[in-house]
Amino acid sequence: MRQRVGDLEPGDPRQPARQRTALGPVARAARAVRVARPAPAADRSGPGGTAGVSSAAPSAASSSPASVPPPCGPSPVPPPPAAADPRSIPPHAPAAADPAGESAVPAPRAPARQPGSGNGLPLGDVWQECRGLARAAVRLDAAAVELLLASAVGQHGLVTAWEKVMVPALRAAGRKWETAGDRYVEVEHLLSWHVSSALRRVPPAAPAPSGVPGAPPVLLACVPDEQHALPLEALAAGLAERGVPVRMFGAALPAEALDSAVRRTGPAAVVLWSQSRSTANRPLARHVAASEWGVKGARTRPAVLLGGPGWAGPPVPGTLRPLGLREALEALEALEALARLRRTGPQTP
């Protein structure tokens, strides 16, 4: 595409009629002669002039001897007008339009997407604190993750911070891992580790005064083959915050070890966590619910709570199934208070 600068091209209908009239060989020769016009003065207002074209660009007409036809013979075809050098056009100059309505200088493109865009976690409709936590985790910014978790717990409390900030970010990291192959494993591991650290920093309740008999503890354990213990860590932190004694056994506790721990501690309640149906062990849950200890005539059984999505389906007889952390804490606090009352016996005036 040519950029027109200077005189009109030969044969342009905009030329006067007297210039287009052919009156013999002399007139035909005259038509081929391009009358040289002086180049316009360069605009010194900036690089390339006001129109953005350098004054060094040649005009459409040339006064060189090569453009003048010989006295006799056919008229040579005049050379096409030279286009302006695109290097002389500043980067922010407006594009020069041609009669066809097209731009001789391409318009600047939109800025490219920044590196890392589109790498966020699929969160959906969540709190702003959760979005900030997810962004920090994707950046592997450990200091920011730790600060955001501490701020969420301090501002909203453990239960709300767990439900509205920690859990949505953890679930999004897990979904991203599943859909991205082996990528984002480091994001979930870093986030899980810092969530666990934040839960363990929750201050427990003040210890009971000396001389007051202790209540039976609450035993927390994952069923055999279950490795996801983070929800139990949140439950342990919430119970300690309420002054409920806890025995935390973590992930994948073997069935024999679980049975031994129940008989040795005599707990007020046992919480068994299962993340998937493949790990949910219903016979083990029924066995723990049927466990007894104590002297004959005063035998005691623990309350058994089943936590996690692995227990979905028909209920296990003799067990409870809380729907979330808040409900589990309320149930266990009531069970612990009842067990404490049974151990201390009736109070005499």
Image (spheres, rainbow, N blue to C red):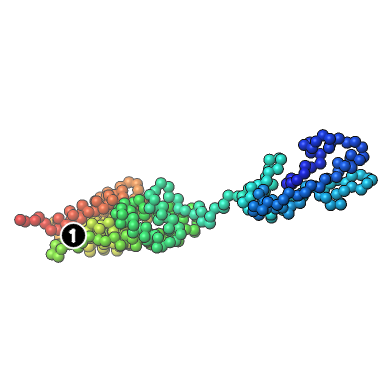
Residue 302's spot in the image, x, y percent?
22, 55
In the image, residue 257 above or below residue 55: below
Percent across and percent down for residue 70 are 92, 48
Q: Residue at x 36, y 53 (%)?
A: 165
Q: Is residue 108 left or right of residue 261?
A: right
* Residue at image location 69% in from the left, 47% down from the top: 104
- Decide if residue 273 is in sight here: no
Residue at point 34%, 55% (across, down): 152
Q: What number of labels is visible? A: 1
Farthest residue toward the left?
349
Who is closer to the viewer here, 315 or 105? 105
- 225 or 331: which is nearer to us? 331
Q: Position of residue 349 (x, y in %)?
A: 5, 56
Left or right: 210 as drawn, with respect to 94: left
- Coordinates of residue 166 in the picture (x, y in percent): 36, 54
Foreground residue among 195 and 286: 195
What residue occupies the far bottom of the structure in this picture?
210
Q: Tell which of 62 and 174 is nearer to you.
A: 62
Mark 1, residues whose alpha carbon is within 10 Å: few (<14), some, or many (≥20)? some
With respect to residue 17, does 61 lie above or below? below
User: Going by the image, does 331 lie left or right of 173?
Assistant: left
Q: Residue at x 42, y 47 (%)?
A: 124
Q: Which residue is mark 1?
A: 215
Q: Is residue 239 visible?
A: yes
Q: Residue furthest right?
A: 72
Judging from the image, what secondary structure is the residue with disc 1 in?
loop
Give the residue type that dot 1 points to: Ala
